Every structure is written in C-alpha cells, then in structure tokens.
Amino acid sequence: MMWNNMMDGFGGIGLFWGPIFMIGIPLLILYLVFSLFRSAAGGNDTRHDFPAPSALDVLKMRYARGEIDEREYEERKRTLLK
C-alpha cells in the first residue's frame, strides 16, 4: 500500500517526459542519419561553389590594394591578354 502512494507522486514525471522521448528520440535518429548522408555526399562543405577569380581579376585586386604599381599592372595585363 505504501509503495503505491509513493509512486503516485512520480506519475506526473512520466506524463511529461514520455512524449518528449517518444518524439525526441526518433527526431534525433533522423537528424543523425541525414547528417551522415549529407557528409558522405560532400554536403558539409562550407564553400559556396563560386567560380575562381581569373588571373586578370587577381591582377586588378592586387593593383587596387596597392601591391603593384601602374607600370607593373599594365605590363602584366598586356602579358595576360596576349
């Protein structure tokens, strides 16, 4: 008799945690499965498939940053456009 009275106090815990485990565990399993497939397919790559800048674009950026002067810029540009 005394055991039944003690268990009545814990009955509410099951009503709260039961649905959370019934929904949460399958969702966690689905998340892990999809993460596994995404990483196997290369979907974890943080790069965005932007095209690589051309040599002329790199030259323009270096000139804009002041890494090369105008004479060197024009000389290299002529070489690239041949």
Image (tube, rainbow, N blue to C red):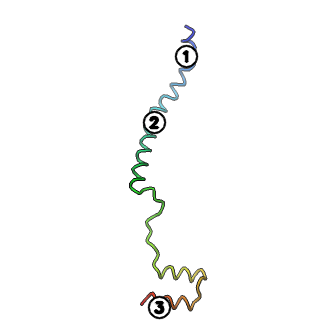
Q: Residue at x 56, y 92 (%)?
A: 71
Q: Position of residue 29 (x, y in %)?
A: 43, 40
Question: Residue 21: image x %, image y %?
Answer: 48, 32
User: How many marks on residues?
Assistant: 3
Q: Residues within 10 Å of mark 2 (few under 14, many from 20)?
A: few
Return the residue nearer the eye: 19 or 79. Answer: 79
Residue 42 x/y as whole percent:
41, 57
Residue named by callout 2: 25
- The local secondary structure at tag 2 comes to helix
Q: Amino acid at mark 2?
A: Ile
Indicate which disc, 1 or 3, sits on the residue closer to the N terminus: 1
Q: Quadrant of the N terminus?
A: top right
Callout 3, which amino acid? Arg
Q: Residues within 10 Å of mark 3 (few under 14, many from 20)?
A: few
Of marks 2 and 1, the one in the foreground: 2
Image height check: is 54 above or below 11?
below
Give the spatial CA distance, label 2 vs label 1.
Answer: 26 Å
Which residue sits furthest top? 1
**Distance of label 1 from label 3 (alpha carbons):** 87 Å
Q: Residue at x 46, y 40 (%)?
A: 28
Query: Residue at point 42% right, 53% down?
Result: 39
Give SS at disc 3: helix
Q: Amino acid at mark 1?
A: Asp
Query: In this figure, which residue is indicated by the disc labeled 3?
Result: 78
Query: First in sequence: mark 3 or mark 2?
Result: 2
Secondary structure under the numbered disc 1 in the rendered image:
helix
Most extreme residue toward the right, as rendered?
Answer: 66
Q: Is residue 7 above or below residue 43?
A: above
Q: In this rendered view, identify the residue nearer to me: 49 or 20.
A: 49
In the rendered image, which quarter is residue 73 located in?
A: bottom right
Q: Is residue 34 above or below residue 82?
A: above
Residue 8 is labelled as 1
